[in-house]
Amino acid sequence: MDSTLKIAMAQIAPVWLDKEATLKKIEKAIIEAASQSSELIVFGEALLPGYPFWLALTGGAEWNKDLNKKLHAHYVSNSVCIEKGDLDAICKLAKSHHIAVYLGIIERPLDRGGHSIYASLVYIDPTGDIKSVHRKLRPTYDERLTWSPGDGNGLRVHDLKAFTVGGLNCWENWMPLPRAALYGQGENLHIAAWPGSDHNTKDITRFIARESRSFVVSVSAIMRPSDFPKTTPFYDEVVKNAPQWLANGGSCIAGPDGEWIVEPIVEKEELIIQTIDFNRVLEERQNFDPAGHYSRPDVTKLIVNRERQSTLEIK
């Protein structure tokens, strides 16, 4: 098996809170990546249909505020219901171009009633099948005003050529135990999906690479005031306090020795392509392997609950 993998990092902006328009941008990026022989394309956290930036710009914690309720309803209406086929076109593209996809979505799952939403990281394999949907375990700070906490069902890894790939959302990457859950399953290519900005990616990317002796691919979206559609509810109130860059990117790749392969790239909307070689993993695991020869399962061991959580069990 060829030991190399060509990866495309799609550092793009959503058409904010517009599911259909953002899907078109995602599809275009997949086609472009495939035209350059990419075998995996990765998108940022919550890219489809966008990160809830209004919470920090309009007093998102104010109770029962009309603006917050209407924007939340607009957000939910543009979120992704996998069961209703919202990702079918992406799956077809993955299959036709034989390219794997990691995509950050705001998921509106029917197995939780269809009204609450989750920041989910979806893996689609090169045959077009959805192999895992990881719902973010713990939304961060103001995210908790709109996103629900997920579960461990998506803490899974997948074979991709010589690699074993897994992924986490944003600040989950700072959580030692979810990382360990992926290491224990043999992960050697770690995907970290971010809503944007190098202040998130510049430290943790190299840290995880050095801790796990794996490749780490951090992919961020970008967001500027011009990416807010003027049809957005309360548009004027949302943009009036927006900085020049709400998310400046910071997509990057670190190698299994913790050194940069691609340093964080900021303030550019572009497709970033890089080829990595699995043999580098084997070289760096010689002196440290966190789930193998440098572990003591007789002393410390992790238990993972991968049951999909629901309030309903029908027998």
Image (spheres, rainbow, N blue to C red):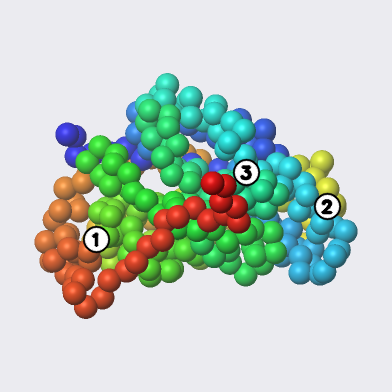
Disc 2 and disc 3 in contact, CB within 8 angstroms: no
Amino acid type of the residue tagged 2 in the rendering: Lys
Q: Earlier in the sequence, mark 2 or mark 1?
A: 2
Which of 123 and 115 lies nearest the eye of the viewer?
A: 115
Which of 283 and 202 lies nearest the eye of the viewer?
A: 283
Dot 1, how many residues are within 10 Å of its Cα: few (below 14), some (14-19), or many (20+)? many
State how many labels appear. Answer: 3
Residue at horizontal 38%, vertical 28%?
127
Disc 3 to disc 1, how far (Cα)? 38 Å
Disc 3 and disc 1 in contact, CB within 8 angstroms: no
Viewer-nearest of discs 2 and 1 = 2
Relative to 149, is 157 on the left or the right? left
Position of residue 188 measured from the top left corner of the image (x, y, whole percent): 27, 53
Dot 3, how many residues are within 10 Å of its Cα: few (below 14), some (14-19), or many (20+)? few
Residue 237 can be seen, yes or no: no
Viewer-nearest of discs 2 and 3 = 3
Which of 25 and 182 lies nearest the eye of the viewer?
A: 182
From what the image shows, is residue 265 above or below residue 173? above
Determine which residue is flagged by label 3.
110
Determine which residue is flagged by label 2.
70
Q: Earlier in the sequence, mark 3 or mark 1?
A: 3
Disc 2 to disc 3, how far (Cα)? 21 Å
The residue sitting at the front extreme is 315
Q: Which mark is residue 213?
A: 1
Residue 124, quarter of the rendered image: top left
Disc 2 to disc 1, how far (Cα)? 45 Å
Relative to 54, is 214 on the left or the right? left
Position of residue 307 measured from the top left corner of the image (x, y, whole percent): 45, 55
Which of 252 and 69 lies nearest the eye of the viewer?
A: 69
Residue 4, quarter of the rendered image: top left
Residue 64, quarter of the rendered image: bottom right
